[in-house]
Image (cartoon, grey):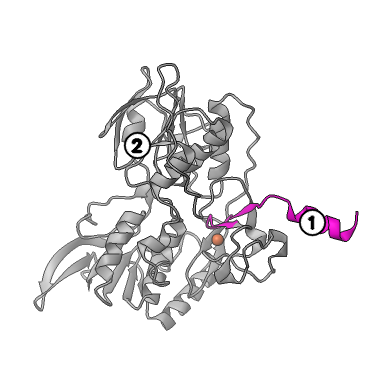
Amino acid sequence: MSAVLATVLEDERPWRQYICRACGYVYDEQDGDRDGGLAPGTRYEDIPDDWACPLCGVSKQDFDPYDGPSSGPVPIRPVTQVPSVSRNRKGVVIVGGGLAGWSTARALRAKDPHIPITLIAGDSADVYPKPALSLAFGHRKSANDLIASFGPDVADDLSVRLVPHAFATAIDAPRKRIRTTRGSFDYDALVLAMGARPVDAKTLPADLCWRINALDTWTRLHAVLARGPARITVIGAGLVGCELADDLAHAEHTVTILDPASRPLAAWSSVEESQRLLDGWTKLGVRFVPSSSIVRVERRSIGGRSVTVINCDDCSFHDADVVIAAIGLCIDTRLAKTAGVAIDTGIVVDASTLATSVPAIYAAGDCVSIAGKPCRFIEPIARQAEAIASAILEQPIAAAVFKAPLVRLKTRSAPMTLTGPR
Ligand code: FE
């Protein structure tokens, strides 16, 4: 074959996508990465070795081929006829409008153009890359900058009946019916993709302590911080706490971070890595307070100014304009329990089919538990969605390939790749 012909044939290959194993960013060859110097149409193999993931900074070697939904814009088609739920085929109801929910909808639609799909979301179900929430203040992004596509557009593109701003309250598993704040829906198969939520703690009341795990709360905090530089205290120096502290300091806020441990990332990194982060923070002006055990958070007026005061058990206290709690994630088990679904650290699923203990109910994404452990990583979600779609449609299921996830700390002061909890 001549070189010219080979080039022409090569150009006719379909565009492919690759997902960052550390943060879930999807590189689409068709779109390229203009900010990173890659023109639209840059093939994966032509990406230079020194290119870095625009979200987290790992190299192209840490990207895997990806068949899931793009984080980029979804083409908007004229309004299509959304399949009505026929008496014979109730179809699939998906609970959750995040990456796992939309990935499942897309995998189902790719395999079956006619199956009715209903997606119930607690918010507007807009599509955005969640890891970007840890970088967006420092990069001066707005909520609109973060939204890749609007929920109704994606729903239209996939012929999905979207029920936004609805909360699922109970599942009647024998009758295959789910009750929500916007009516009840019958299903042939149900997919729970509700994600995880920040941990509550009595000492960190929700009205005084922000929890940033979704675009809606991020947007509200963004509005508050738009008033000008603030004194911010972050509680918890785990992955999310460290990333937020670093990001907020890059946005010129004065940041203090408290943790019960003697160093940041104590559960994740070596002493040397923690020190590298602390050195970066010294230059950035982030103050880390070790061995902090909080007994009470309260609102007080100091010098005529309303501030939030964090009281520690050694009688020290810290006052701040804004307090952010980043003490971990958990899942809301109430809905799954109404169906009698088995739960341990998450909704227990079969690793190959993502089936729960209750027939016709599946689960995907941050809410699942596999072999007793939560599985809160972005990279496996496309494969989970594919497996669920195959199981529901009774098609052969490709064996899932498990790779230990990369954990990339997106702190600009000291970016690092971690190998998992120590
Ligand atoms: Fe990345």
Q: Is residue 13 magenta?
A: yes
Q: Tag 2's secondary structure?
A: loop
- The picture places residue 137, in percent across and down from the top left corner, at 38, 69
- The picture places residue 65, in percent across and down from the top left corner, at 65, 50
In the picture of the structure, the residue carrying the numbered disc 2 is 333
Q: Which residue is at 25% across, 60% downward?
A: 209
Q: Tag 1's secondary structure?
A: helix
Please indicate whether residue 54 sits to the left or right of residue 244 in the image. right
Q: Which residue lies most toward the left here?
A: 304
Q: Is residue 140 magenta?
A: no
Note whether residue 372 is visible: no
Sequence-wise first label, 2 or 1: 1
Which stretch is magenta? 1-27
Which disc is residue 8 wearing? Answer: 1
Q: What's the residue type where badge 1 is placed?
A: Val
Q: Which residue is at 39% across, 46% downward?
A: 151
Please indicate whether residue 97 sits to the left or right of residue 5 in the image. left
Q: Which residue lies most toward the right here?
A: 1
Which numbered mark, 2 or 1, is in the foreground of this view?
Answer: 1
- Cα distance, mark 2 to mark 1? 54 Å
Q: Which residue is at 40% across, 26% downward?
A: 84
Q: What's the residue type where badge 2 is placed?
A: Thr
Please indicate whether residue 204 sits to the left or right of residue 20 in the image. left
Q: Which residue lies most toward the bottom here?
A: 283
- The quarter of the picture where residue 241 lies is bottom left
